[in-house]
Image (spheres, rainbow, N blue to C red):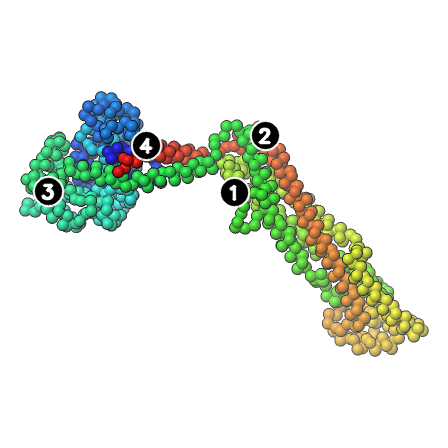
Amino acid sequence: MEALIPVINKLQDVFNTVGADIIQLPQIAVVGTQSSGKSSVLESLVGRDLLPRGTGIVTRRPLILQLVHVDPEDRRKTSDENDPNAWKNGRLYKGVDGEEWGKFLHTKNKIYTDFDEIRQEIEAETERVSGNNKGISDEPIHLKIFSPHVVNLTLVDLPGITKVPVGDQPKDIEIQIRELILKYISNPNCIILAVTAANTDMATSEALKVAREVDPDGRRTLAVVTKLDLMDAGTDAMDVLMGRVIPVKLGLIGVVNRSQLDINTKKSVADSIRDEHAFLQKKYPSLANRNGTKYLAKTLNRLLMHHIRDCLPELKTRINVLAAQYQSLLSSYGEPVEDKSATLLQLITKFAAEYCNTIEGTAKYIETAELCGGARICYIFHETFGRTLESVDPLGGLTTIDVLTAIRNATGPRPALFVPEVSFELLVKRQVKRLEEPSLRCVELVHEEMQRIIQHCSNYSTQELLRFPKLHDAIVEVVTSLLRKRLPVTNEMVHNLVAIELAYINTKHPDFADACGLMNNNIEEQRRNRMRELPSAVPRDKAAGSQGDQEAGTGNWRGMLKKGEEAQADDKSKQQGPLPASPQKGHAVNLLDVPVPVARKLSAREQRDCEVIERLIKSYFLIVRKNIQDSVPKAVMHFLVNHVKDSLQSELVGQLYKPALLDDLLTESEDMAQRRNEAADMLKALQKASQVIAEIRETHLW
C-alpha cells in the first residue's frame, strides 16, 4: 500500500509537465478561512518551517506539496524519486548524501537543503505570477519534500477564504478565492481537509460549508480543529472533538499550532509537537491519542492510501481511453512534412481522386444528411430539370387569337385556301425557344454542385488540406477557375442544342407522322367542301374579293370563296366583338391600329384551323422536349462534368506543382503545428502514466 502514494506523485509530475487538468488525481486539499492555521498544519506535518507566514493573506497561489518519506541512512536521489522500482518497502534506497531536502518543479533539478531558501523561493514565485500586491493566481507551485520525518502524502495548500477586499485586492476577491477552492475540491478524487479555528463557532465554519457544497454526505471531508490552546477560559472543545456538534464521516482531529511569537522566536516544529502532546494530555487526556499532529499525519496517510486504492482502477481506464483519443487526434493532424515535393504531389493527387470519387459516388465519406456530388447532379438532371421541362405547357402563352393571327399573318395579302405551314413553323419555334432557359438553369445548378464538391472534399475527405491553408486556397482557386472556364463552353453547347431544334423543323419526323396524317385528313375535308361550293361563287368573284376586305377587318378570314350575300349574313351573325361591323373603306384602312378582338365566337372553320395548328404544335413540341431532356444532361456531362474530372489532376499539377511554390503552399497554420505538439506531449504523458500504473501489481491494491 505504501507504494501507492509515490505512484500518484509520479503521475502528478507526469501531468504537470503538460499542464493538464484532464486527469483528476487523488490528493488532499486544505481549505479554511484566512489565518485559521492551514499553513501551520502543513508545516507541522512536514516538521520544518518552509511556508511563508504572517497575518493577512499569505498563501496567494495553490501549493502542491508532495511529502516523500526517506530512511535516515538513505541518500538524496538525483534520478526519479517517484520510480516505484527505486522503492524498497516504501522507502527510497539510492541517491546522494543528505537528510532532508526539497525540490521545485519550476527550478527543475535544483536541490534545496535550506528550508529558509524554500520559503523565499515560494514567496518569489508567488510574486512572479500573482504580483506583489494582495492578488491571487490559480497557477500552482509544485514542491517536493524528502525527509525521514514525514509520511508519504500529497497535499494542496489553498488561499484562505476571505470576505472583504484589503489593500490592492480586486473587489471580487471573495468570488475568485471561492472559485479557486472549488476547482480543486470539486475533483471527486480529492480528500478535503477542512481547517477551522477552535476559538470560533463550528457552526459558522466557512471551510465546512464549502466542503459540504461539493461533498454533501461528508464522505471525503476530514475536519481539523486548530488553536485548541487559544479557547476562552472556562470553555473547551470536547463536544466538537467528540463529533457531537458537526459529525464528519472521516473524523475530526484537534491540533495546537505555534503562535506568531513562537515563529518569531524560531521555536522548532519538533518542540512545538512535544508541547502539543503535553497540552492534549493535560486538557483532553481521554482524546490525546486520537488528536495531535502525528495522529493527523498517520490518518491522512491512511486515508490517502485507501482513497488511491479505490480510485486507481477507474483512473487506469480513464488514462487508457484518453491515450486512445489523443492517438487518433494526433493521427488526424498528420506528421511534420519532410519531403515537400512528394507531399504536395500526394495531396494534389488525393484531392483530385476524392473529387472524382465524390462525383462517381465511391467516396470514403458518404454524406447522409443530404444529396451531394454525382447523386445531386443526377437529381438535377432527372428531378429538377426533368420536372421543369414537363411543367412547360406546349401551348403556354399561346391564345387562340394568337394562333389565328399567326395563320393570318402567314397568308400575307391573299386569303388562305389552306392552313399555311409557315404559321405552324413560326408558332412551334416560339414554343421551342421556351426550353432554352430551363436548360441553361440546369447547367448553372450542375456548376454550383461541382463548386460545392470542392468544399465537401476539403471538409471530409482530405483533412490534411486543413493543415495547409495556403495549399487549400490554391486548390480551391484552380478548381474554381477550371469550372469557370468550362461554364461558357457548356452554355454555348446547350444554347446550340436549342438552336439546332429551331434551325430545322422536321415535319417528316417519324413520331410526327400521326399528327401530319390528321392534318392531311383535315385539309382533304376542306378541299372537298371548297369544290362543292366553287361553281356558285365564280360569277361573283370580284364582289367576293371586295367582301374579303371587310371580312378581314372583322376578323372573319376563313379564306373560303362564298356568295356575297352568304358572307354578309355570316358576318352579321358572328360580329359580337367590341368592333362595329362597318362596311366603310376608312375602317378597313385603319385596321393596323386596331387591336385584334379578344372575345368573340369563332366560326366552325376557325375553330377547326386552330385545333389543327394547336395539335401539330403540341405534337412537335413534345418531340423536341424529349430530345432536349435527353441531350442537355449528356452535353453537360461531356462538356462540364467529365471534362473537369478528366483534366482536374493535370490542371492542379500544372498550376501548383512548381518548385517556387513548394515552401509557400506547404506552410502549416501555426495553430495546427501547436495543436500537434500539444497532442504529442499529452499522448506521451498519458503513455507514461499508463506505464506507471501498469507497474503496480494488482496485489498492491489490496
Instruction: Tell us which disc is closer to us: 1 or 4.
Output: 4
Q: Earlier in the sequence, mark 3 or mark 2?
A: 3
Residue corresponding to mark 4: 695
Gap in angstroms between the C-alphas marked 3 and 2: 85 Å
Asked which secondary structure carries label 4, the reply is: loop
Instruction: Tell us which disc is closer to us: 1 or 2.
Output: 1
Looking at the picture, which amino acid does disc 3 mark? Leu
- The quadrant in which residue 220 appears is top left
Residue corresponding to mark 1: 460
Looking at the picture, which amino acid does disc 2 mark? Lys
Q: Earlier in the sequence, mark 3 or mark 4?
A: 3
Instruction: Tell us which disc is closer to us: 3 or 2.
Output: 3
Q: How crowded is mark 3: few (under 14 residues within 10 Å), some or many (20 or more)?
A: some
The C terminus appears in which quarter of the rendering? Answer: top left
Left of 434 or right of it: where is 553?
right
Q: In this view, does 352 lie above or below 390?
A: above
Say which of 71 and 103 sits in front: 71
Q: Residue 658 carries which label?
A: 2
Gap in angstroms between the C-alphas marked 1 and 4: 41 Å
Q: Is residue 177 above or below residue 523?
A: above
Gap in angstroms between the C-alphas marked 2 and 4: 53 Å
Q: Do the residues labelled 1 and 4 touch (CB within 8 Å)?
A: no
